[in-house]
Amino acid sequence: MAQFVAQIDQMNAAAEAADGFIWRLVSDDSEAASFSVFGQRNLLLNVSVWASIDALRDYAYKSVHAGPLRDRKQWFLPMDGPSSVLWWVAAGHRPTGDEGKARLERLAQHGPTAAAFTFGRRFPPPDTHRHSDLSGNQR
């Protein structure tokens, strides 16, 4: 895990500097890895809010995050079911780890829906005329 852990600060700094980044969940020690919503300390939790799906996709697949994402099999065991989930948030909302867990479980149980979806199967915001983007900002 040392190779992965050595990259966390760089990935977090790149996320926070990325176009479209709004917020990320951190614990009192400033690390999302400190959360244990699944009752296991060997799972990494990442909950973040972005201005758009495309901004998040660009960070995930076209930044310093892409290498560790590609190499994740070196450090992490595969999960049964999906390992990431997207959903729309209301203006000003900051999701909790438990909310992320519930959305991931919903995706696993029901497949992609407007309440829990993936990059590959996106859903529009709840109100297509006046909506909150992934950051909760009204458009």
Image: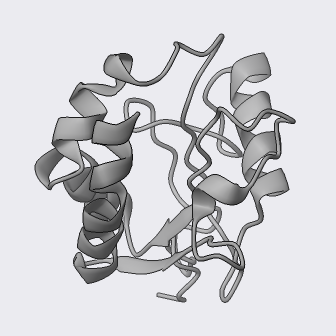
Quarter of the rendering containing residue 42: top right
Q: Nearer the viewer, residue 139 or 102?
A: 102
The residue depicted at 78 percent of the width and 30 percent of the height is 105
Q: Nearer the viewer, residue 130 or 66?
A: 66
Q: Nearer the viewer, residue 70 or 86?
A: 70
Q: Position of residue 66 (x, y in %)?
A: 19, 42
Q: Residue furthest front?
A: 2
The residue depicted at 46 percent of the width and 87 percent of the height is 139
Tell me the quadrant of the picture where the N terminus can be found: top left
Q: Position of residue 31 (x, y in %)?
A: 57, 67
Quarter of the rendering containing residue 131: bottom right
Q: Position of residue 102 (x, y in %)?
A: 83, 42
Q: Is residue 59 left or right of residue 85?
A: left
Q: Position of residue 80 (x, y in %)?
A: 65, 10
Report the label total. 0
- Above/below status of 63 relative to 51: above
Q: Is residue 83 left or right of residue 74?
A: right
Color encoding of the figure: one colour
The residue depicted at 65 percent of the width and 44 percent of the height is 114
- Above/below status of 120 relative to 134: above
Quarter of the rendering containing residue 97: bottom right
- Above/below status of 27 relative to 32: below
The residue depicted at 69 percent of the width and 57 percent of the height is 34
Q: Nearer the viewer, residue 136 or 23?
A: 23
